[in-house]
Amino acid sequence: MDNTETTSGRPPQTDFNTVFNNDLDYPRLGNVTFRRGTLTENQEALFTENWPVLGKDLSDEIIDIDSWFGRSGHKTIVEIGSGTGTSTAAMAPLEADTNVIAVELYKPGLAKLMGQVVRNDLDNIRMVRGDGVEVLVRMFEPESLDGLRVFFPDPWPKARHNKRRIIQSGTLNLFASRLKKGGVLHVATDHADYAEWINELIHVEPTLEYKGWPWESCPQLTNRQVITKFEGKGLDKDHVITEYLWEKK
Ligand SMILES: C[S@@+](CC[C@H](N)C(=O)[O-])C[C@H]1O[C@@H](n2cnc3c(N)ncnc32)[C@H](O)[C@@H]1O
């Protein structure tokens, strides 16, 4: 893709304002792109064996969803920042008719999810490793998704890091562009300050209709099934969970 800032050794970072010809705000990823971590020998072996079939790395390949899942006519939901995949793996069996694509920067998280997928024979989950914003721009066609999920995004609590938050006017615009008409965006946070930040942005994207929470007739599964590791930590601290649902107009 043109208009890409490339610094040696770094994954490509799109200059979104130029590409989309707007002045919206997009997250500055900084060094989080390079999150590493070690895998156990077993995890590494399982990952190496299954990644060519179940996983993809960020690239400029537009994903052929039907051929990747080996079926056609099914809804597709992308989850950005799936972490260790706890809720991804818990929700998937309840939405077996839906293709679920988990996007994560953190390889050990993907390896954990891979373990669950293989052990529990979950055949409706695939994974992409990379920055979810770049993955959406480069690997998914506009209006190709039925749902997008962002559960407990990194809160970046220090004021000088707020710009790194994934929920911003530009990403909401990008999320909307990848959703089909009637598609659903579901965001959850347990961070009060992040909730205030999102509250300010609820109506910023004109093609997303805010549906509030809960939305009884929502066309996709909204119950996350489990208290995730991060959510658990929040609950321990008496944090309130705030959930948001929007529908693509
Ligand atoms: C606080 S954790 C929450 C994980 C999981 N959703 C949960 O509820 O347990 C946020 C996750 O988002 C990932 N992440 C942060 N920025 C991302 C990005 N731009 N693209 C993909 N993943 C990202 C982080 O690596 C981390 O695993």
Image (tube, helix red, strand yellow):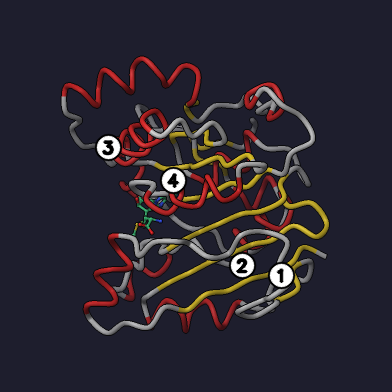
Q: CA distance from mark 3 to mark 2?
A: 30 Å
Reading the image, the residue beneath label 1 is 205
Q: Amino acid at mark 2?
A: Ser
Question: Where residue 184 appears, x then y in whole percent?
Answer: 69, 61
Q: Amino acid at mark 3?
A: Pro
Report the residue at 33% width, 46% height from top: 84
Q: CA distance from mark 3 to mark 4?
A: 15 Å
Q: CA distance from mark 2 to mark 4?
A: 29 Å
Report the residue at 47% width, 27% height from top: 57
Up/down of 29 relative to 117, above or below? below
Point out the tag, 1 or 2, that comes first from the N-terminus: 2
Between 70 and 33, the one lying in front of the other is: 70
Quadrant assignment, res 8: top left
Q: Amino acid at mark 1?
A: Glu
Up/down of 187 relative to 193, above or below? above
Question: Where residue 134 appears, x then y in whole percent?
Answer: 55, 41
Query: Which of labels 3 and 4 is toward the front?
Result: 4
In the rendered structure, are the residues bearing label 1 and label 2 in contact, judged by CB atoms less than 8 Å apart?
yes
Residue 108 is marked as 3
Element type at mark 4: helix
Query: Which of labels 1 and 3 is toward the front?
Result: 3
Q: Determine crowd level at label 2: few under 14, some 14-19, many 20+ residues with C-alpha closer than 10 A.
A: many
Reading the image, the residue beneath label 4 is 89
